[in-house]
Amino acid sequence: MSSTVLSLSNVSKRYGDFTAVNRINLSIPKGSVYGFLGPNGAGKTTTIRMILDIIRPDEGEIEVLGCKSAMQVRDRIGYLPEEKGLYKKMKVWAIISYFASLKGIHRKDAKLRAFELLEQYGLKDFANSTVESLSKGMGQKVQVLSSIAHNPELVILDEPFSGLDPVNQEVLEQLIRDLKNNGQTVIFSTHIMQHAERLCERLLLITQGSKVFDGTVDEARAIIPRRVILECQNDVAALADLDGVLSVCETSVSGEGRLPGTRQWELYVKEHTNPQLILQHCFQNGISLSRFDFTQTSLHDVFVHLVGQEAREHNFR
Amino acid sequence: MRVTLLIAWREYLENVKTKGFWIGVLLVPIVFFMIFHISTRLATATPTRYYLLIDQTGQYADSVEIAIRREHQRRVMQDFMRYLQENRSDSANFAVSNEPSNQMDQLLDDFGNDEVAALDDWLSNGGLSFALQMARPYLRAGTPDFEEPREQFIAAVPPPELDLSAPPEQIIETLRPFLNGERRLPAGDNQISLFALILIPADVNSDIVRPVTTMQSGLQNDTGPRGVQYWAGNLTDTRLSNAIQTSINNAIRQQEYIQRNIDVNAVRDVQRTRLPVSRMDPGKVAGDEQVSLADTFRQWAPMGFVYLIFISLMQSVQYLLSNTIEEKSNRIIEVLLASVTPGELMMGKLLGIGATGITTILAWLASFFAFIQLYQTLETTMIVQILDVLLGSDLIPYFVFYYLCCYTLYAGIFLAIGSLCNTLKEAQSLMMPLMMVMMVPILTMSFIAQDPNGTMARVMSWIPLFTPFTMMNRAAAQPPMIDVVGTTVLLVVTTITVLWLSGRVFRQGILRTGQPPRIIELWRMLRRRST
C-alpha cells in the first residue's frame, strides 16, 4: 500500500445546469479494493468515465497510474462498464482474446489467456459458443473476464454484481479477491452493501455528485451509533441513564408470535460500550427479556443513514 | 495504428464470415447470369402466333404473305450470322472487319452494314441452304448443326361459318369470340388460339392517304376504322402489325410507281444506294482514328464504374451504420473507448468496412470472370474482348482513386450519423437527405455520359459530394486539366475535412443516449473540441 494508483482532486463535471460530479477528492492506494457506493444517479459512473478519460472533467485533476490521462496507460487498466454488452456473433474465447489484444497482448498469448481464464472460472465448455447463446449472467462473466484478461494493474468494475445469481456473485467475489491477492487494485461500484462489506478496504460514498464519506469500512460503521434492540413487557426508558447508553426509544413491534403486551425498544450506545452491562442491569432489575439483540452496524444502515432521504427524493423526482 | 488494424480486422471478419454477406455478394452475379441467360433464351422462345388474313380486295394478300415469310427469313439470317460468328474456325473478332477477305467475311460485312440489302442477297442467293454450304469450310470442327428458328407467324384457316365476302362488321362479329380467346380455331387435329385478324375491306383503296389529301381525309371520315384493320388482344407484340403495315404500304407504292410510269427497279437501286459514315476520334493516334465498337464501349464504360461505386457504397454504408449502432446499443462502445481512442475506433471501422467493400467488388469480378469463362457465347466473347480494352485503359486507376475517395467521404459522414443514433430507425431519418444527394449523380449519369464536358457535368464535378461519381463518368472523355486537378484537390481537401469533423461528432455522439441531436446541437458538436 505504498503508492497511490489513482487520485482525483476537486474533480467536477457539469451538463448544462446539472452538476453530475461536484469537487470530488479521492486517493486510492495500490493493491486495495475500493468501493464506490451511492444511490442511482449519484455520479458514480460519470466519475468512473472521467477516470478512464472517456469524458473529460470540467474542473480538477485526475492522475491514473502516474499519468494525467488514462489513455496514456490504457493497457494497464481493465474496465467493465455499467451497461454490459458484447458482440453477439463472436465466440466467447475470441471476444476475451480480442479485448486483451486491444490492450497490447500478442494475439497468440491473448488466445491462451482467454482459455486459461475460461477454465479457471468454470466457462471452459462455452469457449466456442457464440455470445448470443449465453445467458445474461454468463455473458456478464465473460465480460468481466474480458476486462481482466490483460492482467491490468488497475481494474474498474461498474456494478459488476448486478444481474448475477448468488452463486455467480460468489464467483465474482472470489475473482476480486484473486485480483487483490495478485497485487492488482480494484475499484468497483455497487448497490449491494454486503459485497462492499465483505470485499472493500475503503469506500467512497457519493450522493448528488458530492462525496459524503471516504474511509475504511470500520470508519463508515462508526458514523452511526451501535444499537441494542430489546423486547419485554416493561418500560425500559430508564436505561437511558446507564453509562454508555446514548438514547432509548420505543419502536413498533415487527413480526408475529409474540406475547400480548410485548414492547420493543432501541438503545443507541457509545462505540466501546459493553452490551453485557445492559443485560446485567436488566437481570438485576427483574426485567424479563424476550429478545436481546446486539448487532454491528451494517453498511446498509450507514448507507440509508447518509443518503437515504436524498435517494428517496431523487427516485421520486 | 496497431489497434486501428485490430479493429479493422475484427470488423472485416465480422462481415465476411457471415453467410448473409456471401449470399448478398453472390446474389448479384447470380441475378445477372439469370437475366442474361433467360433473356437470350426468351429471344428464341417467343410462341408461334396464328393470324387470319382476309383480303377482300385480293390485291394485298400475297404481299403480306411475302412480308411475313421475309420476316421469318430475316430471323433465320440473324440466327445464322450469330451461329457463324460463334463457330467460325479462325479467331473470332467482334468488331466488323474493314477489309473482308473471304466470302464469309463479305456476308458478315454486308449484314453489319445494311441488313435489308443483306436479306435481299440472302434470299436471291437461295437463303439458308446456300449460306450453310458457303460457310461449311470456315466452321470449327465439331460445330453442331444449325437449328433453324421456328416460324413466329403462321396463317390460320378461317372457320367454315365465316363468309369472307361479308361486310367487315359482320366478319368482326363472327370472329370476335375467337379473338377474345372464348373460342379456338380448328387446325388439323389441334385447336389453336387466334392471335390477330388482318382485315382488308373491299373499299380499302379509297382510304389511301396521299400527301395532297392528308388533311381533308382526316377531317372528312372520322366515324369508323379506316384502311386495313388489325384486330388483336395483345397490344405489346407489334411485330406482326409492323410487318403488315410495311408490306401493304410497299405494295401500294409499287402500284403507284407503275401508275406514274416510274421504273420500280431503278427506285429499288436508288433506295439501296448509300454512303457509309466513318466515325473518327480526333483524340486517337493519326492513322488510327476510326472509331471501333470497343472505342464506343470505352466511352460508355465509366457509367458501369459509377454504378459499381454506387452499389458498393450502398452496401458499405449499411455495414457502417449497423455495426456502429450495434456497438452503441449494446454498450460495447464504452469498453472499446476505455481501450482505444474514438479516432482509432473510427479509422478501424473505416478500414475494416472499406476492405469488406473491396472484397465484394473482387468477388463480383471473380464470379464475372468465372461466368465468361464457363458460359461461352458470342456475347461473352465480346465481353472478354471489351474487358481487355478496359483493363488496358486508364479507367482503372481513375476508378480506384474515385472509389477510395468516395468511400472515405461518405463513410465519414455515415459513421458520424451512426454515432448519433441508437437504432437503425433513427439513423434512417438522418440518412435520408444524404441518400437523396447520392441519387443525384445516378439520375444524371446518362446525361453526363452523353455530354461529358458540358456545363452540367462541369458544375457537378466541382461539388465534392458529386465529384467522384461525375468525374468517373467523365473519365473517358478527357476532361480539361483544370477540372481534373481542381476537383481532385477539392475532393481530397473536403474528404480530410469531413473526416476531421466526423471525428468530432463521432467522439461526442458515440456515448450519447436518447434522441438524435437537433441541428443546433450538431453545430455545437462540430465546434466543440471534446466532451
Image: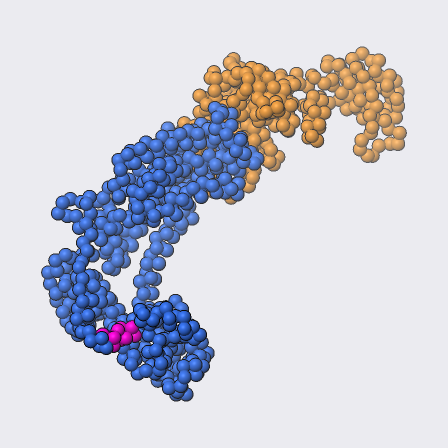
Chain colours: A orange, B blue
The residue that appears at 25% across and 53% down in the rendered structure is B383
Q: Does the rendering let one see residue B390?
A: yes
Dominant SS type (magenta): helix
The residue that appears at 38% across and 33% down in the rendered structure is B495
Quarter of the image for the N terminus of chain B: give it: top left
The residue that appears at 24% across and 51% down in the rendered structure is B296
Residue B224 in the image: above or below residue A283: below
* Number of on-image labels: 0
The residue that appears at 22% across and 51% down in the rendered structure is B294
Q: As rendered, which of B106 and A249 lies closer to the eye?
A: B106
Q: Which residues are magenta?
A: B247-257
Residue A171 location in percent, x, y? 56, 32
Q: As rendered, which of B516 and A144 lies closer to the eye?
A: B516
Residue A9 in the image: above or below residue B206: above
Q: Does the rendering let one see residue A290?
A: no
Q: As rendered, which of B299 and A179 lies closer to the eye?
A: B299
Residue B55 location in percent, x, y? 33, 81
Residue B358 in the image: above or below residue A185: below
State the image quarter where residue A36 is shown: top right
- As drawn, the residue found furthest toward the top would be A243
Residue B499 in the image: above or below residue B41: above
Residue B68 location in percent, x, y? 28, 74
Residue B360 within the segment the image draws in magenta: no
State the image quarter where residue B483 is shown: top left
B61 displayed left or right of A300: left
Q: As rendered, which of B217 and B401 lies closer to the eye?
A: B217
Residue B429 location in percent, x, y? 51, 42
